[in-house]
Amino acid sequence: MNQNDTCPFAAGMCLFSDTAALSMDTGNISSHDDLGINTQEKDRITYRRKTTCAPLQDQGYVTSLNYTDAVKRKNLGKFGGQRGDILDFYNFGRSIGNNFTYYYNRHAATTGFGYELDSSLYDSGGLENTWTPVHTLSRDDADVSIMFLAANRLLYSNAVYDPIFAATTEKTSFIDNGRNITYFSSDFFVSPLACIDQHQFCNPNNQKCTDLQSYYTAVKRTASIEFNAVQSMITSRLSIDFIWETISLSKVASVPHPIKKFRPLTRLGKGIGGRGAAALRAQESVSGIVSAQLPNNQWMIEVESWFATGLAKLQQLVVQYAAGPPNVVEGAYISKPTDPISQMMCNNQQVRSTSNAINFSTLGIVIILVIGGLLIITSLVLDTLVGFIQRKWNMRDYQRVQWALDEKLQLQRLAYEEAGMGTWSGGTSFVPVTKFGETFGMPPDVDPDHPRIVWHKESSSNVSPSSTYKNGSGEELQPLSTLRYTAV
């Protein structure tokens, strides 16, 4: 975001200076990673939107007439009012059937309601525009939106110095509980604000991009960046307006092609739509016809909100392409796609779940199970395998025997066996066992309250010559004596 960007219109049109514009740039939005259109890497695209806005200088663009004189101008257009009303006509370009862009009846400033917000949109290259901007606002390389904000009778608890919401005129003052309370009214009947939207498509396969252009031009120029059929279909999805107005127009909600009308999904004006004052963040500070103090950059807060709303709407509509419209009016029906590419896209839409469902990688799970299983199997057979190799080739007998005898069950076997209890086998196995069905109890003459084992030394001459062991260096050792354990 740049708060000091160049004014996107003719010199002198921006309210403060030619470097007093606010610009917002999405950077490259991935059709796969950001929009969830699940395609192969070669079929993905990136989309970028840049929006630049500025409050307008309206001097020389407003004509004030009383209602009687306005009625006499037959070619002026359609407007409302009654005798005695003063009407302000804003001439930023013709709208359908009118020789003005917007009109304001000053009588609204005396009635008991607050904010009013109106917008007009111009798609550069479009065929069904309801407004054509004057040359000082017109852009061949961008879509233009103009907004008109009227505070009407709304009062502010403190002075506001924002250029669009400016309210420094003391309207009323009274004493409440010994305190002097002053309210402020808007400095202007209407404050105009205009924005441009520019769009760009890129082909990640060859790194080619269209330049920043109006939506229609950007879509048409994708032919020069060599999109394949799937990439072109994704562009088409981002170029069709799914506001379900097509249902009421055609009585058919066709997914994915209701009526092929190019309507950029992310224009700033789309963030306002028909919501009027409900699209204002400033409305959150209003109670009745009184507003709390607003920051000096409130107009920027509003523009950022509309920009974010447009992007959220784009994400929502991409999902609805696959899921279908949330509401289908009576008499309408949904026609599913028949071509392979459209069917593939309807069945391959990634959605971030807000419930307890969790997305996971199947490949990752398989890798974990395979590697984990191999490690478990290795741990189970490693001791047996190493022991077999050591016995087979008489390797490290001393260490092997000591490793086996340090096990708890082997220590228990040594004690029982030397006490003369049981006939044991598996002297170096993990689990030593007695003969099948063999049982034994407590030896005779054992003190049941304090059983113990008594050692009896025998001469080393009784030791078999084969009873030798090798130390860690492979040196053979003869035992000095053997120990016999007797439980008493």
Image (cartoon, grey):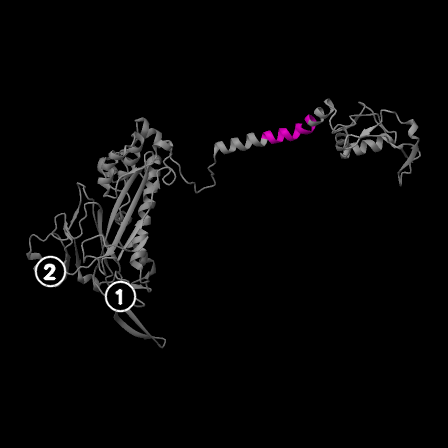
As drawn, is 87 to the left or to the right of 289? left
> Compared with residue 268, is residue 484 higher up or lower down, i.e. above or below?
above
**Which portion, as a residue range, is magenta?**
373-385
Tag 2: Cα neighbours inside 10 Å, few (<14), some, or many (≥20)? Answer: some
Q: Amino acid at mark 1?
A: Ala
Q: Nearest the camera: 479 or 383?
A: 479
As drawn, is 311 to the left or to the right of 445? left
Which SS type dominates the magenta stretch? Answer: helix
Residue 333 appears in the figure = no
Q: Which residue is mark 1?
A: 167
Tag 1: Cα neighbours inside 10 Å, few (<14), some, or many (≥20)? Answer: many
Using the numbered discs, state the Cα–Cα distance from disc 1 to disc 2 in whole angstroms.
27 Å
As drawn, is 139 to the left or to the right of 200? left
Q: Determine which quarter of the picture holds residue 433.
A: top right
Q: Nearest the camera: 76 or 461?
A: 461
Q: State the image coordinates of residue 31 (x, y, percent, origin top left).
A: 35, 38
Q: Amino acid at mark 2?
A: Tyr
> Which of the two labelled residues, at mark 1 and mark 2, occupies the earlier sequence position?
2
Q: State the image coordinates of residue 300 (x, y, percent, origin top left).
A: 30, 56
Mark in the foreground, 1 or 2? 1
> Compared with residue 14, is residue 429 higher up or lower down, i.e. above or below?
above
Residue name at image x 40 percent, y 36 percent: 350
Q: Are marks 1 and 2 in contact (CB under 8 Å)?
A: no
Q: Which residue is mark 2?
A: 67
